[in-house]
Amino acid sequence: MKRLATICAAAVVWASGVYADDFWVGVFAKDTGFTAQSYTTSTSLSHLRNAIENEWNKGYDVIDLSYGHDAWLAVYAENAGYTKQAYMHRRDLKRFKKAVESYEKQGMHLINIEYGAGEWVGILAAGGKQSDQEFVYTRYFEEFENQIVKHWKRGYMLVDVEAAEGYWTGIFAKNTGFKNEAYVIVDEWDDVIDMVKEKWKEGYRIVNMEYAASEWFLIFAHMPEAREELFANNEEIEDFRKTIKKNWKRGYMLVDVANGRD
């Protein structure tokens, strides 16, 4: 099954050939503006908090977070443009949104959301290129699709999505630089590969990959300049670490990470 909605370079794809039940996926890109990068893996939220604080102390910002294989994988970058960041988690989504609203009063906005181990985890930030971030959640996917269209009409773009505990959640932002945006939902990983190739040919680039509600939710956008990008998948975290380092040596930065199934 495929569902597509859209509003209106060189590109390389590499897949490891791993088609296990559960695997890591990374999106890599050149010309990101990042001057350095790191990542951490943590087996608990307390370890994740410590890892994030350690990377903050080194001058890095969190740019993405994913949960899988009973582990949290956080991606960081130097020169991401944020002036301040915060990390928080809640078990209840309504309380999570109240916490987001509290941070917004302090001038910080939600830039990344992830669900794992019974917790909703958020990364918030001040500064950055994007502005006017809005966080929404709905019970039903049809409602979520309506929210996407409504936000597009208001000039917002969808930059992150997560589905868990019967909810669909999304982060929308203005000033993304995207000329237009599209999203696609597919069941199988093979369809993901085919769809990315198809959208690349249309001039789109990957904004976000997420395994949500047993489907792959893919966000694409026409960016100001069509960057060179690729994506790769590995079942084991050790192999995924090797893939990250391999692509770093080739000049690609890790810009998005997900954990999902065939």
Image: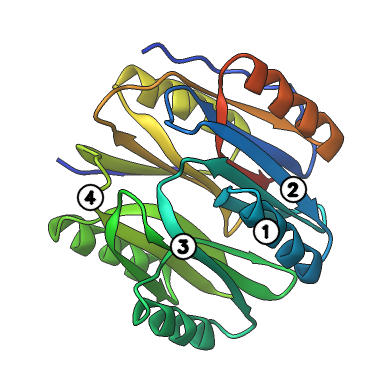
Q: Earlier in the sequence, mark 4 or mark 3?
A: 3
What's the CA distance linking mark 4 and mark 1? 26 Å
The relative height of residue 216 versus residue 87 in the rendered view (above or below) is above
Q: Which residue is mark 3?
A: 84
What's the CA distance linking mark 3 and mark 1? 13 Å
Q: Earlier in the sequence, mark 4 or mark 1?
A: 1
In-image side of 7 versus 227 (left or right)? left
Coloring basis for residues: rainbow
Q: Residue at x 40, y 11 (%)?
A: 10
Please report contact status of discs 4 and 1: CB closer than 8 Å, yes or no. no
Please report contact status of discs 2 and 1: CB closer than 8 Å, yes or no. yes
For label 1, the SS is helix
Q: Which residue is mark 4?
A: 175
For label 2, the SS is strand
Q: Residue at x 42, y 23 (%)?
A: 31
Please name the amino acid that badge 1 sits on: Ile
Q: Which residue is mark 1?
A: 52
Please say whether residue 82 is visible from this viewpoint. yes
Please name the amino acid that badge 3 sits on: Lys
What's the CA distance linking mark 2 and mark 3? 19 Å
Q: Residue at x 75, y 40 (%)?
A: 23
Q: Earlier in the sequence, mark 3 or mark 1?
A: 1
- Tell me residue 104's x, y (percent): 36, 77
